[in-house]
Image: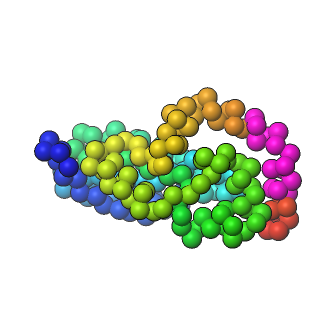
Amino acid sequence: MGTNVRPARTYGAPIRASDLRVTRFTVRLIQVGFGRAPLYAYFNGTVNAPYAMSKAGVEQFGRALRTELAIHGATAGVLYPGWVKTPIARAAFGDNDLVTQVREQLYPRFLGTAIHPDKVAARVTSGIEKRSPRIVVPRRWEPISALRGIVNPLTDLALDRNTELHGLLRQLETRTGK
């Protein structure tokens, strides 16, 4: 950290859409006088809409919390990770052929590759030290994030017309019994 950066204390908290225990968490940040609330958001939720909805809520919560905590010297930041090499992502990277094909239809190759969790950890650490309001990792997602208002409608249009993706989604629904 640079000499003009105050050391940040980070308090992790599991935040679920159905269980936002915000008050106690926020009070603790205020009590220490200088804290950091890292929150996790997500880019796209095709085939996992409930998860994506909760992350969209977390994103908006993080933005509001950052503003509300500013008067107390505490901050909140939102992490926007791309694909990360974790057990939950394995289905999209070969463990489930159908889910892998859906990922390949949803994302161009440069956005559809997973990174190691250590890279995410390094960016989170840097973002906390800098008190960044947004931490986007890997950086190749930054233009997509910055241009969401333009890119999302175009992406939606392309996906709505992608008949190969539609066929894969029908197969996935059949497999899961939906």
Q: Is residue 164 magenta?
A: yes
Can residue 62 be seen at all in this image of the molecule? no
- Name the residue at the left extreme: 3
Left or right: where 13 falls relative to 103: left
73 or 87: nearer the viewer: 87
Name the spot of residue 12 as percent of width and height, x first. 35, 62
Position of the C terminus, as image quadrant, is bottom right
Left or right: where 130 falls relative to 56: left
The image shows residue 50, relative to residue 62, as above or below, that is below
From the image, give the main secondary structure of the stretch colored magenta.
helix
Q: Is residue 125 magenta?
A: no
- For the image shown, how many numbered marks are present on the structure? 0
Q: Which residues are magenta?
A: 157-170
**Corner quadrant of residue 4:** top left
Left or right: where 53 falls relative to 131: right
Name the residue rendered at 28%, 44% in the picture: 130
The image shows residue 90, relative to residue 7, as above or below, that is below
Left or right: where 28 falls relative to 119: left
Name the residue rendered at 26%, 49% in the picture: 129
**Corner quadrant of residue 24:** bottom left
Name the residue rendered at 60%, 47% in the picture: 111
Can residue 49 be seen at all in this image of the molecule? yes
